[in-house]
Amino acid sequence: MKPSHVIRQLVARALYVKQLTPDIENEINYELTRLGYISDVDYEALELLMSEMDAGRIRLVPNP
């Protein structure tokens, strides 16, 4: 079975728009729950997202 790296794609979307929206966050959480594990590629993508947020380059958008 070939992994789809959906989480990596969601992180790429957050990096592109420079914000982590509730929709993107919910989709990431859904994929983590659905898969039950995280691939190395997806883990590295999440690490990048967190470091960009810590550096203030990605804004966390609150729920409306």
Image (cartoon, rainbow, N blue to C red):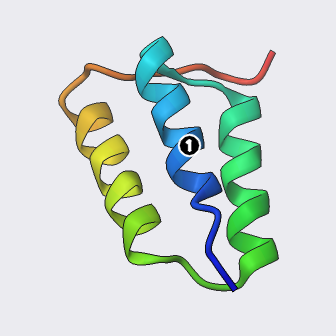
Which residue is nearer to you in this view: 38 or 21?
38
| Count of number-bearing discs | 1
Quadrant of the rendering where the C terminus is positioned? top right
In the displayed structure, 62 sits above or below 53; it is above
Query: Residue at point 31% right, 56% down?
Result: 47
Residue 63 horizontal/vertical position (percent):
75, 24
Query: Residue at point 66% right, 42% down?
Result: 25
Residue 6 horizontal/vertical position (percent):
64, 54
The image quarter containing residue 15 is top left
Q: Amino acid at mark 1?
A: Gln
In the displayed structure, 34 sits above or below 28; it is below
Query: Does residue 49 appear left or right of residue 31 in this picture?
Result: left
* Residue behind mark 1: 9
Residue 33 horizontal/vertical position (percent):
76, 73
- Could you classify mark 1 by the number of other residues whose Cα lies within 10 Å: few (under 14), some (14-19), or many (20 or more)? some
Query: Residue at point 68% right, 69% down?
Result: 32
Query: Does residue 48 appear left or right of residue 5 in this picture?
Result: left
Outermost front residue: 2
Query: Does residue 3 appear left or right of residue 40 in this picture?
Result: right
Query: Residue at point 28% right, 47% down?
Result: 48
